[in-house]
Image: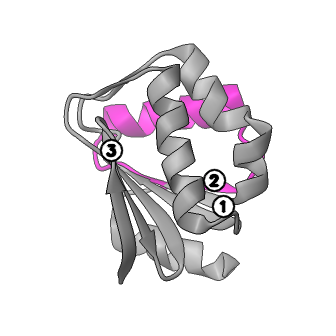
């Protein structure tokens, strides 16, 4: 159930009962400034309470540079506010990129890749 919802130029950010859902918009380019906007919206929706996060739509031709990926993986404020993270992708190239992201950037919170939103929700709820 969606409690609150806001949108940036590249994503829809929804506060759900158990987690924060970030859905990327098709063919978006996410630079560091946009990443900070998305993060700020998410933290505002959560009112400073740490939450699990589901990232959905990375397989929609999203472009993100290394500096932005590093920010998402290692920013201290994001790390404090993220309990766990699930990435939902449903094609092989996107799964390989997600695995590379996890191995190269080494996010500090538990993170896992899923093929469906339902699977990701089930895993995320184990952290509630």
- Which quadrant holds residue 48? bottom right
Magenta-span inclusion, residue 81? no
Q: Which residue is mark 1?
A: 84
Asked whether the beta carbons under mark 2 and mark 1 sit within 8 Å of each other, the answer is yes
Q: From the viewer's perspective, is 20 left or right of 5?
A: right
Q: Residue furthest left?
A: 26
The crowding category of the residue bearing disc 2, from other C-alpha atoms within 10 Å (few below 14, some 14 to 19, many at least 20), is some
Please tell me which residue lies in front, 109 or 43.
43
Picture disc at residue 11: 3
- Of helix, strand and loop, which one carries label 1? strand
Q: Which residues are magenta?
A: 87-113
Asked which quadrant contains residue 71, the reply is top right
Q: Are marks 2 and 3 in contact (CB under 8 Å)?
A: no
Q: x and y percent of residue 116 in the render?
A: 33, 64
How far apart in space, not on screen, are marks 2 and 1 (Cα)?
Answer: 6 Å
Q: Secondary structure at mark 3?
A: strand
Please tell me which residue is depicted at 61% across the width and 35% down the height of the picture. Answer: 72
């Amino acid at each position: 159930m969606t409690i609150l919802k806001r949108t940036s130029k590249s994503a829809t950010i929804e506060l759900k009962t158990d987690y924060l859902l970030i859905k990327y918009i098709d063919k978006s380019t996410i630079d560091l400034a946009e990443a900070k906007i998305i993060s700020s919206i998410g933290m505002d929706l959560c009112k400073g309470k740490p939450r699990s996060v589901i990232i959905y739509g990375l397989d929609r031709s999203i472009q993100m540079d290394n500096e932005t990926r590093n920010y998402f993986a290692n920013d201290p404020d994001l790390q404090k506010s993220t309990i766990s993270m699930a990435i939902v992708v449903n094609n092989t190239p996107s799964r390989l990129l997600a695995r590379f992201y996890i191995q190269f950037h080494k996010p500090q919170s538990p993170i896992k890749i899923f093929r469906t939103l339902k699977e990701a929700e089930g895993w995320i709820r184990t952290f509630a």
